[in-house]
Image: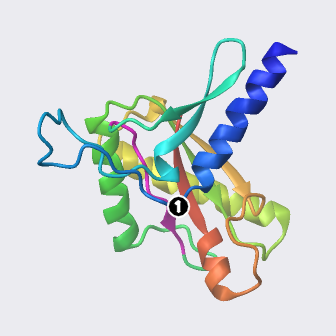
Amino acid sequence: MKNTLKLTLILALAIGLAACSKNVKQNPAGDAGAKGHVTEITAEDVMMVADEDGLYGVGMMSDSAVKLTPIYFGLDQYTLSAEAKKTLDANVEALKVKAINSVTVEGNCDERGTVSYNIALGDKRAKEVKDYYVKRGIPAKNIKIISYGKEKPVCYAVTETCHAQNRRADTVIQ
């Protein structure tokens, strides 16, 4: 019972922090005696963390947190565009700088096409990204791939703009 109450309070705090759109400012530069300052805290700076008992709490994202950018593909395509390669180069640098050892590349498709076609296309997209990472020095053994086909859309509208957002490969840190 104690743990349930604790979990409820922590989740309420997390939801409140995530919903807060105001920036928190403290110790602005120039204050006498300030030993550093926080310029702003946003919902993106907050993360949920679990302890060994599975109880969740609120934590702050560290400066060392890595955000990897997804890349996008044309309709029925799995080859990398020049823009996608630039994005992947930035991802490679982030992985190397932060010494990230394990990632999964997730291939995704829009809702058009059969399930089997989209699974195969998502797999080709993930393999292309993996191959590019390997060429740029990330060990192949550290990269898993998975195809979700059309099962993990980020946009649900039936428009070309939305379809384009779903034709992607995400690199997820393990």
Image coordinates for residue 28, horizontal then vertical, percent: 22, 49
Say how the picture is coloured: rainbow
Q: Is residue 138 above or below residue 42?
A: above
Q: Main secondary structure of the magenta part?
A: loop
Q: Is residue 20 magenta?
A: no
Q: Is residue 52 visible?
A: yes
Q: Is residue 71 magenta?
A: yes
Q: Is residue 106 visible?
A: no
**Numbered-mark total:** 1
Residue bearing mark 1: 21
Query: In the rendered view of the protein, which quadrant contains the N terminus?
Result: top right
Image coordinates for residue 91, horizontal then vertical, percent: 36, 51
In which image quadrant can residue 118 be found?
bottom right
Would you say 71 lies left or right of 135 here? right
Would you say 95 lies left or right of 1 here? left
Residue visible at 52% across and 51% down?
A: 43
Would you say 44 lies left or right of 166 here? left
